[in-house]
Amino acid sequence: MTTHAPFTAIHILNGPNLNRLGTREPQIYGTTTLADIETMARRAAGDRPLEFRQSNSEQQLIEWIHDATDTAAGLIINPAAFTFTSMAIMDALKMFPRPSIELHISNIHRREAIYHNSYMSGVVTSVIAGLGARGYVHAVHAMAELIDTPKDTD
Ligand code: CA2
């Protein structure tokens, strides 16, 4: 882990099985690997510091959200299957006080009903889904804009 000046970095967290991306179900998830996605995200971030992490563990993801709460300017998370199961991750995200984006490679709403009810969507700033691996690039650009645009005060 790298230490950055406080509240400058974008943190990108990836949930279970995403470390296996590019190896199965290319019709849904494409052929891009998570390492390719990290390269794309770093390019999109330019000079802005970026933390890019993946874990198969709910506990680890919660600890990383706490870490982001203490240090990050913005948080992008693809919680993968925890999207539909984890009130603990939802509670951690609820406490994140700066811009947050829930990100999915596939359009979860076009898929089977089990993929329709995200615990996360009601507590994040924004949701991006269905843009494939390029969704990470769009999410980084959107996050940079959210961070740099002063909040509406009305
Ligand atoms: O579309 C997304 O990004 C998802 O968050 C991916 C999750 C799935 O549970 C969500 O519904 C939508 C699954 C990630 C599975 O990762 C794979 C790993 C290897 C091959 C194919 C998929």
Image: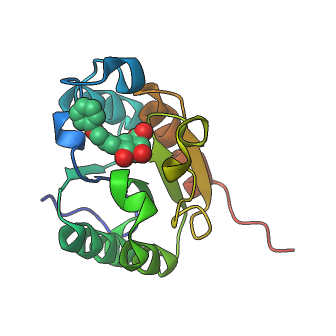
Residue 11, image quadrant: bottom left
User: Does 91 appear above or below 108?
Assistant: below
Residue 148 shows in this picture:
yes
Establish if 61 lies above or below 139: below
Residue at 45% across, 27% down: 132
Q: Position of residue 146 (x, y in %)?
A: 61, 53
Query: Residue 98 appears at what percent x and percent y?
Result: 53, 70
Residue in front for this viewpoint, 125 or 6: 125
Q: Tell me if residue 137 comes above or below residue 116 in the rendering.
A: above
Kindly tell me whether residue 38 is visible in this rendering: no
Location of ligand 1 given as a quarter of the image: top left
When asked about the image quadrant of residue 125, the answer is: bottom right
Identify the residue at horizontal 35%, vertical 34% (top origin). Answer: 41
Nearest the eye: 114 or 147: 114
Q: Nearer the viewer, residue 6 or 111?
A: 111
Left or right of 135, for residue 21: left
100 relative position to 3: left or right: right
Counting from the top left corner in percent of width and height, residue 140 is at: 46, 41
Q: What is the count of numbered marks?
A: 0
Quarter assignment of residue 27:
top left
Quadrant where the N terminus sits is bottom left
